[in-house]
Image: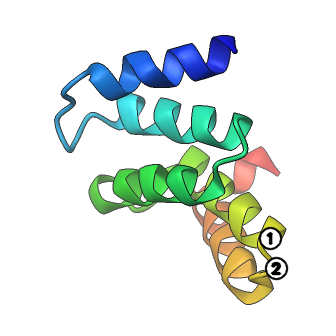
Amino acid sequence: LLAAAAVEQLQDITAADDDLDYWRSLGDLYALLNHPDMAEQSWRRVLQTSPEDELALRGLGLVCHEAGRLTEAAEFFDRCLRTHPWDR
């Protein structure tokens, strides 16, 4: 219930397209609320501005994995590991 209220508050904010914290947070909340399609949209928006964003790549990898899109998931995880090898 608290997460749902947080999503509503975030949706009310008019965020700039390049506000990465906003889009990351929205993606995390959608994932928490089991709305993978909306989480995916938010994280893809992050990648439009920051193609190597670790949190967005990891989130997209998880969403794709859970949806059975294993090849796509592997591509996101691979990109994440290549760009952020110290976080293995």
Tell me which corner region of the image, top left, top right, bottom left or bottom right, holds residue 64: bottom right
Q: In the rendered structure, which amino acid carries the disc numbered 1?
A: His
Q: Residue at x 64, y 68 (%)?
A: 82
Q: Real-space Cα distance between discs 1 and 2?
A: 5 Å
Residue pointed to by mark 1: 65
x and y percentages locating residue 15 in the rendered image: 21, 30
Give neighbour class at mark 2: few <14, some 14-19, many 20+ (Cα, 10 Å).
few
Residue drawn at 67 percent across, 55 percent down: 58
Q: How is the image coloured?
A: rainbow
Give the quadrant of the N terminus. top right
* In this view, 14 is above or below 48: above
Image coords of residue 72 (percent x, y): 66, 82
Camera-side residue of 85 and 40:
40
Badge 1 crowding class, 10 Å Cα cut-off, few under 14, some 14 to 19, many 20 or more, is some
Asked whether disc 1 touches disc 2, contact meaning CB atoms under 8 Å apart, the reply is yes
Disc 2: which residue:
68
- Farthest bottom residue? 71
Q: Residue at x 64, y 55 (%)?
A: 36
Identify whether 38 is placed above or below 7: below
Q: Residue visible at 74% across and 88% down?
A: 71
Q: In the picture shown, does residue 74 fall above or below 26?
A: below
The amino acid on which the numbered mark 2 sits, given as a three-letter code, is Gly
Q: Is residue 73 left or right of residue 54?
A: right
Question: Hey, which quadrant is residue 63 in on the image?
Answer: bottom right
